């Protein structure tokens, strides 16, 4: 078994990065040829492509390392498809009049998959390329940039209320349409000093189509990402998952400890409405670093990143026993409590723990000690939730029932 400190180069991932660069180059070349750009100007656009791609990939890798992006947010195959559609929208926009580029569609498409920062970066890239290669005017650039920034914010809020069928959501979608209709019309007036009925009609039609997209298709796109997230958790929790089997081969005791922590964490999480998937996976791999040795936390985090663990789980591994950082979420606090209790009871001899009264006292004493140290102060767990978790552990018991 390879050590996690060794570099792991994914040929498949590298191939997708090369394919993305080729996509950018072809898209830039197409727009340049359509607008009769000189060879040196085309060379300059390729430099822009390389700079954007470099920053974009670094941002994704950094997001994975810090746990801000999950595997679903960095799947290079889907990222490639995302950028293909982005280029299609950009090319369509280059064929339309200056104030009809589908900025709203571009923004909502990217925001269904990427973070707000990455959506803004991708949007700025396509806006820049269309404006440079198609000779768009100053007011068009103002229009594109303002629409891009506003739509990023609107898409982020719509993501939170996407499943509602309320009047407030309908009004919000109408606001999206009005923003994407009024701004192009206003900037068109600034540019020409008059309004054209045909342009107004086309802009309004585009806004209506965007509203339909936001109401019907955007929720489905974001739900697809959530479904992928569930699949990734299901894989981690399967008993034949390679990493879990590695842990079992390393130590049967560690394996059964992990299984018990995972089960109890989920039971406790239900009491306060915590994320059960995160609890199950984090409890299972909480002591993953022991398999690789010191520095245990760093090794566990690197191994989790290499295996594309969800960011919430990586964060909990980084908060192992509060050594580097105190638990920052209710899930992290629960896993910490359960792991400490299961560890203590494993160290007790069977005679000492024969009485359930002794086990109850162990739970009360241990959790009260932790609470008094303030280790859970940053975890957003209220005192009422803490008491519910403690009572649930007393009711359930720490030892596996035969």
Image (cartoon, grey):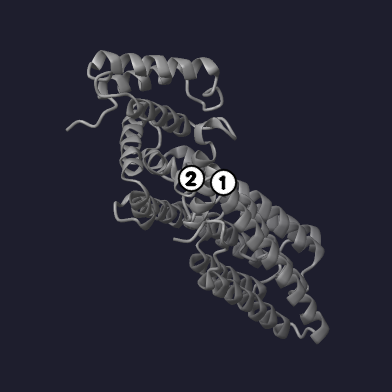
Q: Are marks 1 and 2 in contact (CB under 8 Å)?
A: yes
What secondary structure is found at the residue carrying circle 2?
helix
The quarter holding residue 83 reads bottom right
Residue 401 image point, x, y percent:
20, 30
Numbered badge on residue 78: none
* Of 343 and 227, the residue lying toward us: 343
The quarter holding residue 58 reads bottom right
Q: Residue at x 59, y 62 (%)?
A: 106
In the rendered structure, the answer to whether residue 88 lies left or right of residue 161 reads: right
Residue 140 image point, x, y percent:
75, 63
What secondary structure is found at the residue carrying circle 1?
helix
Q: Earlier in the sequence, mark 1 or mark 2?
A: 2
Q: CA distance from mark 1 to mark 2?
A: 8 Å
Q: Which quadrant holds the N terminus?
A: bottom left
Numbered badge on residue 289: 2
Q: Residue at x 50, y 32 (%)?
A: 321
Can residue 171 be seen from the camera position used here? yes
Q: Which quadrant holds the C terminus?
A: top left
Q: Which residue is mark 1?
A: 298
Q: Say if 132 sits above or below 109 in the image.
A: below
């Amino acid at each position: 078994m390879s050590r996690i400190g060794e570099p792991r180069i994914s040929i498949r991932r590298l191939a997708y990065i090369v394919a993305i660069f080729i996509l950018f180059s072809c898209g830039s070349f197409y727009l340049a040829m359509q607008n009769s750009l000189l060879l040196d100007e085309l060379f300059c656009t390729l430099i822009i492509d390389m700079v954007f791609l470099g920053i974009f990939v670094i941002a994704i890798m950094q997001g994975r390392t810090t746990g801000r992006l999950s595997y679903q947010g960095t799947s290079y195959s889907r990222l490639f498809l995302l950028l293909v559609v982005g280029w299609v929208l950009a090319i369509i926009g280059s064929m339309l009049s200056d104030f009809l580029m589908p900025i709203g569609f571009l923004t909502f498409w990217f925001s269904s998959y990427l973070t707000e920062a990455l959506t803004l970066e991708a949007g700025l890239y396509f806006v820049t390329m269309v404006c440079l290669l198609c000779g768009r005017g100053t007011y068009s650039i103002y229009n594109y940039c303002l629409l891009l920034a506003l739509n990023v914010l609107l898409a982020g809020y719509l993501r939170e209320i996407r499943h509602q069928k309320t009047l407030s959501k309908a009004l919000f979608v109408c606001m999206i349409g009005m923003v994407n209709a009024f701004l192009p019309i206003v900037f068109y007036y600034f540019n020409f000093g008059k309004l054209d009925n045909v342009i107004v009609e086309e802009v309004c039609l585009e806004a209506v189509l965007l509203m339909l997209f936001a109401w019907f298709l955007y929720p489905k796109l974001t739900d697809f990402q959530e479904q992928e997230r569930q699949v990734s958790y299901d894989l981690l929790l399967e008993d034949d998952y390679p990493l879990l089997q590695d842990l079992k081969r390393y130590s049967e005791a560690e394996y059964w400890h992990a299984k018990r922590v995972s089960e109890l964490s989920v039971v406790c999480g239900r009491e306060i409405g915590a994320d059960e998937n995160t609890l199950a996976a984090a409890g299972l791999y909480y002591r993953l670093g022991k398999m690789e040795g010191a520095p245990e936390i760093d090794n566990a985090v690197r191994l989790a990143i290499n295996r594309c663990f969800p960011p919430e789980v990586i964060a909990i591994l980084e908060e192992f026993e509060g050594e580097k950082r105190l638990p920052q979420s209710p899930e992290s606090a629960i896993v910490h409590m359960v792991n400490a209790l299961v560890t203590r009871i494993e160290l007790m001899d069977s005679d000492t723990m024969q009485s359930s009264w002794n086990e109850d006292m162990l739970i009360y004493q241990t959790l009260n000690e932790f609470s008094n140290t303030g280790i859970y102060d940053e975890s957003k767990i209220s005192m009422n939730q803490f008491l519910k978790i403690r009572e649930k552990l007393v009711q359930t018991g720490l030892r596996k029932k035969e």
